[in-house]
Image (cartoon, rainbow, N blue to C red):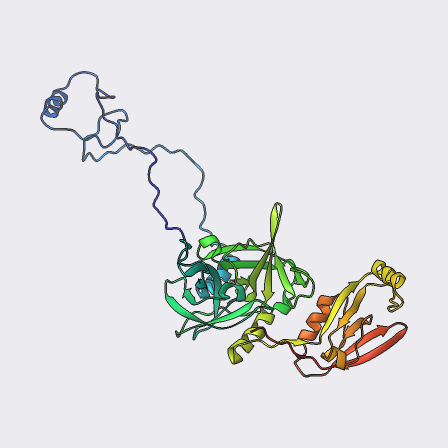
């Protein structure tokens, strides 16, 4: 996608001056000068330099002095400054790939009344990065979703047919495999150590432009409400410019480590906000996909609502079934029959205060706390039911996968 370069050319025709008369005729007519004039009628004379008080013949040992336009002293040789962003991009860039996809869809009107072909093809494009030298590539699930053909292109021009090992729509992580060896790899960092204000560098293929680098900072971490409530991903927020085509590409730090996968954009007048899946989350999901072809997610089977003092007053005034404290918190709205929450004794109108040893303040924090528990393991919940404080034990089950 990189535009081909071109050498600069003059914007207009190039003309060369031609002397029609000598600008520096010597005073008097010397015999040699007259001879020169006669010779000029027989052969052209090439003037290599202008005159400086006299005429200079070709091959003359004396040349006119060049006019100086500056008398500033020569600058001392300086060591080129180091650039952390350049070094980071050099480290990760060779492992960032372009992913081209083709989706074949049945056209219900194909072949009928000029409705087009029976099978239509839809082309897409995104980014990814190599994490194993034997051809494991991480990208977004929405980049490869429904694709019948996947093509992976490296910055050095090598091209491979890719196979989607699996995709997880809940976290938007997918793994693609190509048959190759000794490929460049992108080092993975630790997204738990990322802090707002650090450098954030995005590499990808936005809008059809290969190997594009943009830079900004980490604007926020743990953005669980970036794309709506109840998200399973604590997104990294950055102001690095990200556009369609960047999806699946890496977000790296200034040490050349991948800290996230660029996945979503929220447009706003005058600016856009970009979000990345933390690499710790992506690494966990990708490992499950490589092992068994899909990712496992725990669930407890409840519908939750963020509680505010105003909402608590309205609920308390409208019904006697719930008596809620006028605080900020998480209230259980509904419990699925036969679910882990139902078996563990959780009821509607319970106020969830802690999951394990972690205090929770909104539904997304409850969701993320549940996600950290393995399927079948015991998990404690501290809840408030009217005036009573309770500790319940639940065992999350595996969330049914959509076929």
The residue closer to the viewer here, 214 or 340, is 340
The quarter of the displayed image where residue 339 is located: bottom right
One can see residue 84 in this view = no
Q: Is residue 396 above or below residue 125?
A: below
Q: In the image, residue 17 lies at what x, y percent?
A: 26, 27
Work out whether residue 233 can be spotted: yes
Please identify the residue farthest to the top as the structure is shown: 28
Q: Position of residue 112 (x, y in %)?
A: 41, 57
Specify the farthest residue to the front: 113
Q: Quadrant of the C terminus?
A: bottom right
What is the tally of numbered marks visible in this picture?
0
Work out whether 55 lies above or below 150.
Answer: above
Name the residue located 61 percent from the left edge and 48 percent from the top edge: 271
Residue placed at 29% from the left, 32% from the top?
Answer: 13
Q: Nearer the viewer, residue 96 or 207?
A: 207
Q: Quadrant of residue 24?
A: top left
């Amino acid at each position: 996608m990189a535009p081909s370069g071109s050498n600069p050319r003059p914007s207009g025709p190039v003309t060369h001056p031609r002397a029609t008369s000598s600008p520096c005729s010597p005073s008097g007519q010397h015999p040699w000068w007259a001879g020169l004039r006669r010779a000029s009628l027989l052969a052209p004379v090439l003037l290599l330099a202008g005159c400086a008080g006299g005429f200079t013949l070709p091959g003359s040992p004396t040349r006119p002095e060049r006019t100086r336009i500056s008398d500033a002293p020569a600058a001392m040789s300086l060591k080129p400054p180091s650039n952390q962003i350049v070094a980071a991009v050099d480290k990760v860039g060779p492992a960032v790939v372009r992913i081209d996809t083709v989706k074949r869809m049945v056209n219900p009107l194909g072949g009928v009344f000029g409705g087009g072909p029976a099978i239509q093809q839809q082309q897409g494009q995104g980014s990814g990065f190599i994490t194993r030298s034997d051809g494991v590539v991480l990208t977004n699930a929405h980049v490869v979703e429904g694709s019948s053909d996947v093509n992976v292109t490296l910055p050095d021009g090598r091209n491979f047919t890719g196979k989607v090992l699996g995709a997880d729509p809940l976290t938007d992580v997918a793994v693609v495999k190509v048959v190759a060896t000794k490929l460049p790899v992108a080092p993975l960092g630790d997204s738990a150590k990322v802090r707002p204000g650090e450098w954030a560098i995005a590499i990808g293929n936005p809008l059809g432009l290969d190997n594009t680098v943009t830079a900004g900072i980490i604007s926020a971490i743990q953005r669980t409400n970036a794309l709506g409530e109840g998200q399973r991903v604590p997104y990294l927020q950055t102001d690095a410019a990200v556009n369609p085509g960047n999806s699946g590409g890496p977000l790296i730090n200034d040490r050349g480590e991948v800290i996230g996968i660029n996945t979503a954009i929220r447009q706003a007048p005058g600016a856009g906000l970009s979000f990345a899946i933390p690499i710790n989350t992506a690494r966990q999901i990708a490992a499950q996909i490589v092992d068994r072809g899909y990712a496992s997610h725990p669930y407890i089977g409840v519908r939750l609502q963020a509680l505010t003092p105003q909402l608590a007053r309205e609920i308390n005034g409208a019904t006697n079934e719930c008596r809620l404290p006028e605080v900020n918190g998480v209230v259980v709205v509904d419990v699925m029959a036969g679910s882990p929450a139902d078996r563990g004794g959780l009821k509607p109108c319970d106020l969830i205060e802690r999951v394990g040893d972690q205090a929770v303040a909104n539904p997304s924090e409850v969701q993320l706390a549940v996600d950290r528990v393995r399927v079948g393991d015991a998990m404690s919940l501290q809840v408030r039911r009217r005036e009573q404080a309770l500790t319940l034990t639940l065992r999350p089950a595996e969330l049914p996968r959509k076929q």
